Amino acid sequence: MMRLGKLTASKIALALTKTKGGWCASRENVMVEMAVERLTGNPLESFTTTAMQWGKDTEPLARAAYEFHTGRKVSQVAFVNHPTIEWAGASPDGIIYGFTDSGPGTAGPCGLLEIKCPNTATHIKFLTTGFIPKKYMWQMAWQMACTHAGWCDYMSYDPRMPEHLQQKIKRVERDEAMIAMLEHDGKEFLAEVALMVKTLENMEIE
């Protein structure tokens, strides 16, 4: 319910990706879904695939493995609203608090954790290349915009692999230019959602 009708990190790429011909095809679908949630006050039902369920079930194991191998304590939070943009927020997989300019833990999180538990082929590809798709870079940037975090550790985890190949962590630093771009386009997107909601609310069906 905290995410209802909001532009979240997981929706950023679907809503804001541009192609040579204009906005991506998924933009309108996300817009309609958000408008419906605002109009009805109920979250839309989503289909859970086997791969999605695997990710949900495996995420706690990945979080524990991250804590064990890095020595960092990972805190969890349900949802974080964007500090300045209404109807926007994010749900990081983990928040790492630590020393900041104002002392330990006094100026918000110093970092985030983004966990992916993909199929084994995708995991191996990340092990060998370290490449992070744009949609996940945007997802992490939006999370950092919402939380004021300075970095996000991207973690791919697959417990089906031999122990020394089960995980790979890559640090992604905060990118102010990327965040500014996403915030600009995000505001434009949200303005269109608000207009859609207002139009539907005032619509008279003959």
Image: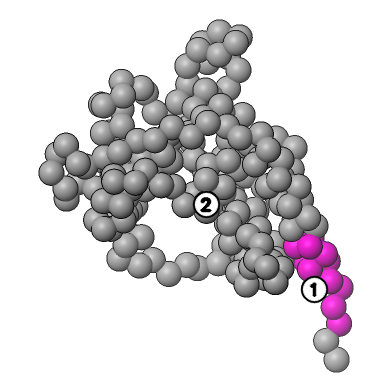
Q: Is residue 205 magenta?
A: no
- Classify 157 as above or below 174: below
The residue under the point 31% across, 32% down is: 66
User: How much space separates mark 2 and mark 1, taking CA atoms?
Assistant: 33 Å
- Classify 86 as above or below 54: above
The disc label shown at residue 200, or none = 1
Q: Is residue 55 left or right of residue 16?
A: left
Pinpoint residue 62: horizontal percent, then vertical percent.
Answer: 29, 40
Q: Secondary structure at mark 2?
A: helix
Q: Is residue 201 magenta?
A: yes
Pinpoint residue 73: horizontal percent, then vertical percent.
Answer: 37, 23
Pinpoint residue 89: horizontal percent, then vertical percent.
Answer: 62, 44
Q: From the image, which quarter does the C terminus lie in?
A: bottom right
> Which amino acid, by three-letter code, is at mark 1?
Leu
Boundaries of the magenta span: 192-204
Q: Which residue is mark 2?
A: 134
Q: Nearer the viewer, residue 158 or 46?
A: 158
SS majority, magenta: helix
> Which amino acid, by three-letter code, is at mark 2?
Lys
The residue under the point 66% across, 34% down is: 176
- Classify 187 as above or below 194: above
The residue under the point 53% across, 42% down is: 140
Camera sees residue 76: no
Comes first in the chain, label 2 or label 1: 2
The disc label shown at residue 9, or none = none
